[in-house]
Image: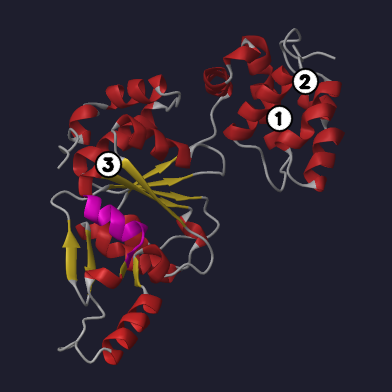
Amino acid sequence: MDALPRRAADIFASPEVVETMLAESGYLPDSGLSTAVFLALRLGRPLLLEGAPGVGKTELAKRIADILDLTLVRLQCYEGIDASQAIYDWDYARQLLAARLHGESASRTGAIDLYSEEFLVERPVLRAARLGDRALLLIDEVDRADEQLEAFLLELLAEGTVTIPELGTVAAKRPPMVVITSNRTRELQDALRRRCLYHWIELPNLERETAIILSHAPEVGEGLARAVAHATSRIRELRLAKPPGIAESVDWAKALAALDYEALGPFAIDATVGVLAKTVDDVNAVLAARETILKSDNREQIRD
């Protein structure tokens, strides 16, 4: 058996260590987020992250799992998902086949247990519970699921266990780390919130977004990275249907560099608007606002 990894709380020994290690991995958190991650691990509590799409909620969970050498188990929520898709299920086809074979075999004696481990289908929540503190369970975009799924998740969030009536309770010696993300498309239940530590991830300021762009796309240079961060901030003020997140600003900088643009101007926006805007109305809104987007106090970074 492989040795268990070092305790995550010992690796992330302080909020400052969390911030440093995440920064070294290419993720640049602020002190509030670093503290929230530290406390979630130290107190053994799920961490609920909310914020606009594209601020880095999912990416944070991936970086934590990578740094701590944890198995990332991802539950991607969507409308209509239920417990059989999130926690566990039974392989009904195999159960039916086994029952038929058992009934047709005259040599077999005794009853067959159709609700045994052999027929159990492991879903993300059960898998994470079995892995215990060797796993990070990412419950991604929980607001897309309905309230019933939240109720099914409460046992794991509160006790670190999953109960299977036919088999009993699955309980790891130490529960997995749990990160839950929400884009606030609906309000979450108080019962779920009470079991979590909470942090709202803000969009970064100009300096932080510039640093993020440079950490992911150093080839663009500081001047263009700052121009992209400034222009993206202006575009977010347009109240688009799908405002660009950090991922889009990084992609925009990479696209400009790929096209050999050394500065940001109207032609550069025209050529790359599809990196930022994801609907025809948003594209038109960005193109119509080019003059506003390009306004800057630093004219050598943004010019025609």
Q: How many marks?
A: 3
Amino acid type at circle 2 is: Lys
Amino acid type at circle 3 is: Ala
Q: Is mark 1 on a helix, strand or loop?
A: helix
Compared across the picture, whether 2 is left or right of 191 comes to left
- Which residue is disc 3 drawn over? 40
- Which residue is disc 2 drawn over? 295
Image-quadrant location for residue 86: bottom left
Residue 237 visible in image? no
**CA neighbours of label 3 inside 10 A, class few (<14), some (14 to 19), many (20+):** many
Residue 150 visible in image? yes
Give, as a single range, the part of the protein colored magenta.
121-131
- Tag nearer the camera, 1 or 3: 3
The reply to whether the magenta stretch includes residue 126 is yes
- Which residue is disc 1 drawn over? 234
Quadrant of the frame with the C terminus? top right
State the CA–CA distance, disc 2 to disc 1: 9 Å
Amino acid type at circle 1 is: Arg
Would you say the residues marked 2 and 1 are in contact, meaning their CB atoms lie under 8 Å apart? yes
Q: Where is residue 177 in the image (x, y as percent from the top left)?
A: 28, 45
